[in-house]
Amino acid sequence: MLPRREGEYRLAIDLFINPAIGSFKTVDVERRDVAELHHKFRHKPYQANRTLGVLSKMFNLAEIWGLRPDGSNPCRHVPKYREVKRERYLSQVELQQLGQVLTEVEQDGSETLYAVAAFRLLLLTGCRPGEIQTLQWQFITGDGMELPDTKTGARRIPLPKAARAVLSALPRLPGNPYVIAGKVPGKHATDLQHPWRRIRERSGLTGVRIHDLRHTYASNAVSSGMPIQMVGRLLGHSQIQTTMRYAHLADDPVRRAAEENAARLDALVGAPVPSHLLRAVT
């Protein structure tokens, strides 16, 4: 199986790019051709923009390889569609429901130990799905996880006790370097989507994506009062702007602190006398 990002690129090429301009010579593709392809998928802004990004990378490489003149990338000045970021965090009740179902499927054997462990690790570390899916035992050290290649390059990720407990309960299979072992000997699990769909339906979490476990990790960190910069480091964000999508959650501990402080002061000062009682007294 291809790595997730490489697989997405191949999908965009096979399903969208090749049918539209695959018969063109590299040097003959013009901006209007790219704009038409991008416009065709305007009803799917995410897909349209990802396809545009793949094309842009391809034409940048074409320039480097001398297949097109410098500065001739036809994707330039084709504006991306506005994407509505989908934010979904699990509530405390939903987390309890998920935890109960994970335990149940672990015990009744309806899902593999490795799939269940993957979901627990995603929630406890805030890792990207691909980082856990392809995690190797050799990457785990006394300091945490030392990942040599992630979306933002090499990355060191802390491993809290709860996550280490999940790892220690997993059997290591002879000849398989991967933590989340798959059905094929020596390989990692290639399909977490199907077990996740079964688990989320059983948990009553219809529509919740695997990636939402990472959002839940981040939202809980910010809501507990953790500085946004620290959350960004835990998530492996290369730019603070990416983490700022959670910034509004930082207001929660401030509001709680304001309520608690005002309640203590109110207990000392006392509630105001209602105005109609004041008029009656005077």
Image (cartoon, helix red, strand yellow):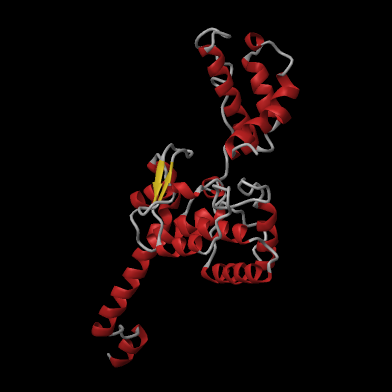
Q: Count the labels in the image.
A: 0
- Relative image position of residue 254 (x, y in whole percent): 34, 64
- In the image, what residue occupies the spot 35% across and 53% down? 143
- Given residues 112 and 87, the one toward you in this image is 112
- The percent coordinates of residue 62 (x first, y second) are 56, 14
Q: Hey, which quadrant is residue 154 in on the image?
A: top left
In the rendering, at what x and y percent does residue 127 appear? 48, 50
Figure quadrant of the C terminus = bottom left
Judging depth in this view, the residue of 143 and 249 nearest the camera is 143
| Residue 9: % across, % down | 62, 31
Residue at 60%, 72% in the rendered image: 100
| Residue 81: quadrant of the picture | top right
Which residue is pictured at 58% across the width and 21% down the height?
A: 58
- Residue at the spot 65% in from the left edge and 46% down from the top edge: 190
Does 118 sit above or below residue 243?
below
Task: Point out the residue furthest to the bottom here.
Answer: 281
Q: Quadrant where the N terminus lies?
A: top right
**Above or below: residue 59 compared with residue 206:** above
Q: Residue furthest front?
A: 174
